[in-house]
Image (tube, grey):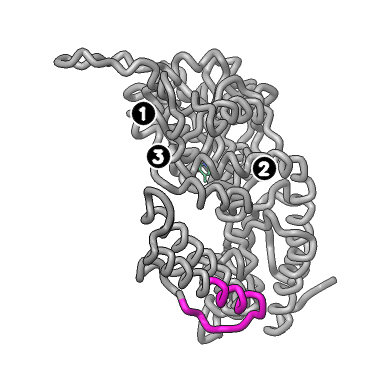
Amino acid sequence: MRVQKTFEALFELEEIRGLFREALPGGLEADEEARFQQRIARLKAIVADLEAGTGTPAVTKIAGTIDIRSREEESINIHPIQAAGRLTTEARKALISYGDGYSTCDACRKPFRLDKISKPGIAEFHEELAAFVNMDQARVVPGARRGFQAVAGTLVGKGDSVIVSALAHYTEFLAVENAGGVVREVPLDARNIVTAEATAQKIEDVRTETGKLPVLVMIDHFDYQFANEHEITGIGKVARQYDIPFLYNGAYTVGVMPVDGKKIGADFVVGSGHKSMASVAPSGVLAMTEEWAPKVLRTTAMVGDLTRRKFGIKEVEMLGCTLMGGTLLSMMASFQAVQARTLQWQDEVKRSNFFIDRLLEITGSRVLSEYPRKHTLTKVDTTASFDTVAKTHKRRGFYFSDELSSRGIVGEFAGATRTWKLNTYGLNDRQVRYLADTFVEIAKKYELPVSG
Ligand SMILES: *Cc1c(COP(=O)(O)O)cnc(C)c1O
């Protein structure tokens, strides 16, 4: 009820905020003042309920149809893609403050480009972002996918080959397809790792087959299926040997662990704001070396045939400006915390392994990802443990989600009891212990053998 009342209080404050907007210019007139006082009285009642944990839900919908999303307040969320995109409190403040449309544009001055705006400190943020991943230039983009798209749009022509991995994300396929290119996948080794050697072999294969070298190597540091760590530095070296630009896909790394683009030998570093940088979707970062900036960040040369208009320094691949409101400000507001948290990555990995070790004590459970874990995202196989219960349970695989959610844990793929993924990112010691205890408790309830 306290969570419910917190939302109601926030909504009531937004109503009050709305009154100020309506009352312009100047202050509240008599009737508006009366409505203001009414709202304040309501707010006080909500706060009283909030304090005491009393009352009943008075508001359950936004705009009459949209449910309140209180998942992050009410549950431990182990959703594979949501864990590191949860907003910081500062980001939520930025979102309510900068939610209006083009809110970044208040002090946009000539030459009119997002990354040049200094109030709020967007220009400075761009410099900090580039430094954060140790690259020369950075742009904010609407998701990692738009970073791939900008690079592919620049480097990939019709029929060109692009090296990706056999675990590549679908958005990498689509970015290449959109540019008219063809993906060529590097096979995995027996441990489901993309090696430098296999990458070199694939480049050779492409050259033999097509008579041309691939135009881009785009590889994930940690893939989305197993979150295995791939030989990213070695792959960077191979790409350099062939003089093929290398895009480091840090969707699962930038914002959670330290990333040094220069050390990796990357020409491009791409990160995802909503996946790993505690930011509103769609957001992300595309960083590059000075060498590539003139190409990927080329400015428009187009001239209108009638009006002779030109748009000067607008960057073609960015379509001018990218994140023009709450998305960017949420990213900026989270940035300090995000920088700091990357230094705590080893603790996150430790907690990930703590949970997995406990899960493995439930006989029959397996880890499909590399183990010990180097990431907080893990693919597990519970076919021989939790799934054996699903076979005879009247709720089938859903019994497991029911058991978890009744204990305040959400985010596992509902109904999946065979192979599924979870992410422990952001859970503290107490929460991760609770998570592990809960799995063991459910196992015991269904008489699954537990060792240790
Ligand atoms: C999530 C993910 C993406 C897509 O990121 P967006 O920011 O949503 O575009 C790309 N690659 C990998 C490996 C991912 O895990």
User: Is residue 49 highlighted in magenta?
Assistant: yes
Q: Does the closest atom of ligand 1 sit within 8 Å of the Cβ of label 1? A: no
- Image location (x, y in percent) of residue 417: 57, 70
For label 2, the SS is helix
Task: Look at 65% across and 77% down and name the residue there.
Answer: 407
Q: Which residue is mark 2?
A: 338
Q: Where is the C terminus found, in terms of image quarters?
A: bottom right
Task: Look at 60% across and 75% down and name the residue there.
Answer: 405
Q: Are marks 1 and 3 in contact (CB under 8 Å)?
A: no
- Image location (x, y in percent) of residue 420: 57, 62
Q: What's the magenta region?
A: 43-58
Label 2 crowd (10 A; few <14 / some 14-19 / many >=20): many
For badge 1, the amino acid type reads Leu
- Could you tell me how far apart the alpha carbons at marks 2 and 1 are, in whole angstroms? 27 Å
For label 3, the SS is loop
Q: Can residue 20 be seen in the rendering of this structure?
A: yes
Task: Look at 69% across and 67% down and name the residue there.
Answer: 365
For badge 2, the amino acid type reads Val
Whether residue 412 is situated above or below residue 390 in the rendered picture: above
Label 1 crowd (10 A; few <14 / some 14-19 / many >=20): few
- Image location (x, y in percent) of residue 351: 77, 56
Which of the pair 378/4 is nearer the observer?
A: 4
Q: Can residue 172 be seen in the rendering of this structure?
A: no
Q: Residue furthest front?
A: 30
Label 3 crowd (10 A; few <14 / some 14-19 / many >=20): few
Q: Which residue is mark 3?
A: 102
Task: Look at 53% across and 77% down and name the residue there.
Answer: 398
Q: Earlier in the sequence, mark 1 or mark 3?
A: 3
For badge 3, the amino acid type reads Tyr
Q: Earlier in the sequence, mark 3 or mark 2?
A: 3
Q: Which residue is mark 1?
A: 319
Which of the pair 290/378 is nearer the observer?
A: 290
